Image (tube, grey):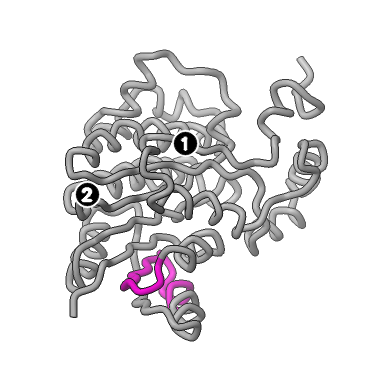
Amino acid sequence: MNKDVVILTGAGQIGMAIARRVGFGKKIVVGDKSMKNAEAVAKIMNDAGFDVTPMEMDLSSRESILNIIGEAQKYGEISMLINAAGVSPSQAPIEAILKVDLYGTAVLLEEVGKVIKPGGVGVTISSQSGWRMPALTAEQDELLATAPTEELLKLEMLQPQNIKDTLHAYQMAKRCNEKRVMAESVKWGERGARLNDIAPGIIVTPLAIDEFNGPRGDFYKNMFAKCPAGRPGTADEVANVAELLMSPAGAFITGSTILIDGGATASYFYGPLRPEK
């Protein structure tokens, strides 16, 4: 029996929390660079009554993206995409961040957009980090939004001499994610489908706990201590937003980014997190 199919990329806490909200009664195909991680999420969800198949997937590879789409189509029509895959500034060098978070996400949105079911919906996870850098020019924004995917990494603004460090690369990638969602949502709309982006702040996950205890730990702890919420967020709070965006209640929302950071970005521009000049 064919089912509606959910593609989940990134076998982490946020992706799993979203999949648990929207994936019941559907087939879920979860892909991750680590097959061990994909199998772990599949086991947790299958033991809770979901129908999940794990597979190895590399977001930086178009071939790998097409493979997971092909696997998903064996079970039915793809009705949902949850993209929670990516690498962080402390996990990878500049080149890998741009290849995975920027290029890979753009390819995934493009390729799923070609086959998404009418009435389907997708969400991708970016970051508050994309809101922390100076504004780009209108021309730069348009290039990030609409340049052919295979030309993205050739853009002048993304060349090594123009990227200061891994954090800057991550910020550019996440800014690109948001612009790409806007442009791709127009194409998805031609199929009667919707696409949105969620930009989380500091969310407690095993990775985040490693960060709290690592060399940048004080930076992160200061950030959530001085944001209006006064605490980090949880994966389930991100899933609350995704559930709205992916449900009929969010039917008029597409091409948008929802910032969910406890007010950290507001504090960065207008409060105690504001950098000293």
The extreme front residue here reads: 249
Quadrant of res 95: top left
Residue drawn at the location 69% of the way across and 22% of the way down: 269
Of the two numbered discs 2 and 1 in the rendering, the one whose residue sits closer to the viewer:
1
Residue 261 image position (x, y, % from top left) = 65, 41
Q: How many C-alpha atoms fall within 10 Å of the one at disc 1: few (<14), some, or many (≥20)?
A: many
Q: Secondary structure at mark 1?
A: strand
Residues in magenta? 23-39
Seen in the picture, residue 208 relative to 30 is either above or below; the reply is: above
Seen in the picture, residue 239 relative to 140 is either above or below; the reply is: below
Q: Identify the residue under disc 1.
A: 257
Direction from residue 259 to residue 152 in the image, left or right: left
Quadrant of res 275: top right
Residue drawn at the location 63% of the way across and 43% of the way down: 201
Q: How many C-alpha atoms fall within 10 Å of the one at disc 2: few (<14), some, or many (≥20)?
A: some
Measure the alpha-carbon separation of dots 2 and 1: 20 Å
Residue 2 image position (x, y, % from top left) = 19, 75
Q: Identify the residue under disc 2.
A: 111
